[in-house]
Amino acid sequence: MTIFNVFGLWRNTSASSALHLISKKKSHETNQLPYNVSDSVRQHPQCFQSIGKMMVLSRILSDFLRRISKESDFMPGDFYDPKPLRTKKFFSMLIEFHDFVCHNSSRLLDIESDAITKKETNDRLMEDIAKKMEIIRQLRIKNENIRIQEEEMLKRIAEVKDEILEAQGCKNDLKRQYDDTKIAISACESDIQASELKIVENKEVAEKLASQIIQPIEREELEERENFLARIRTENSEKRKNLAKLKQTLDIFISCF
């Protein structure tokens, strides 16, 4: 804690407050070169600023002394002569400032130490906040990726549901075809049995006719029966082939279910 920090806390009085405002304004003005200075001055800006600060300091001291004495004829020699009232006011102000520093220096040091501690704590908190913000950013990215994956999963589920419905329709169609095939197989087996029975009957009739004297009319009838038997045998052969195909189709249907 420097004397300037202490003086900054002591600026509650009207004179010190005004002095501080003037010094702040003047010092800000001297940090910038006027736009209309010569090129030689612009080549040495630091020198210009140093001279400007000295002039500002003298102006501040003059304003300071004038505000204390409330007169415009305050001279530096008055510092060595405590008789004038304005000089007494000046030294009184210095004594008050000295007392203020003595009584409040320890408290101001504690305040400064506490401020440093709070600043360090605040810096750590800001670092923690920055780390947490980075974690939050990563989590947001992760959540966004999860959301995209979830949307893709829901889309895939909808597609699978459509495929299941389509497969269910195909299954129902296959079930109907399966039932129709079973009925067709049953009918085909009945036809084959009836055809085989006719073959046996016609064979017996042919044998009887062969053992008897065959008349021309009977021969024609026999030939017709033989032709009929040949047709039946051909139909039975085709029906057996169809039956084999139907059984093969039935096995495929059974494997699907």
Image (cartoon, helix red, strand yellow):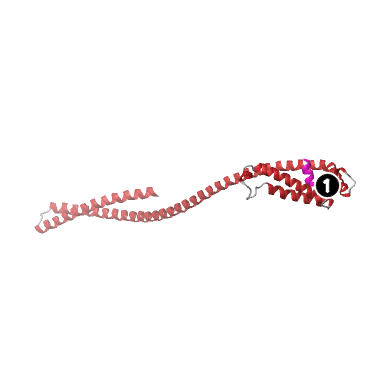
Please name the residue that numbered disc 1 is placed on: 75
Side of 250 relative to 40 (left or right): left
In the image, residue 5 lies in the stretch drawn in magenta? yes
Q: Give the prevailing secondary structure in the magenta stretch.
A: helix
The magenta segment: 1-9
**In this view of the protein, which residue sits in the foreground, 173 or 216?**
173
Residue 208 located within the stretch drawn in magenta: no
Q: Residue drawn at (48%, 50%), measured in percent from left and top?
A: 152
- Residue 192 percent location from the top left of the image: 26, 53
Q: Total number of numbered labels? A: 1
Q: At x 38% / y 49%, what residue is drawn?
A: 256
Q: Where in the figure is residue 197, as x and y percent of width and height?
A: 24, 53
Q: Is residue 230 visible?
A: yes
Q: Position of residue 72 (x, y in %)?
A: 82, 52
Q: Residues within 10 Å of mark 1 (few under 14, many from 20)?
A: few
Residue at far bottom of view:
217
Can you see residue 12?
no
Q: x, y (%) of residue 228?
A: 18, 56
Residue projecting furthest to the left: 216
Q: Amino acid at mark 1?
A: Met
For the point 23% across and 50% down, the residue is 237
- Work out which quarter of the rendered image holds the N terminus and state it: top right
Judged left or right of residue 60, residue 249 is left
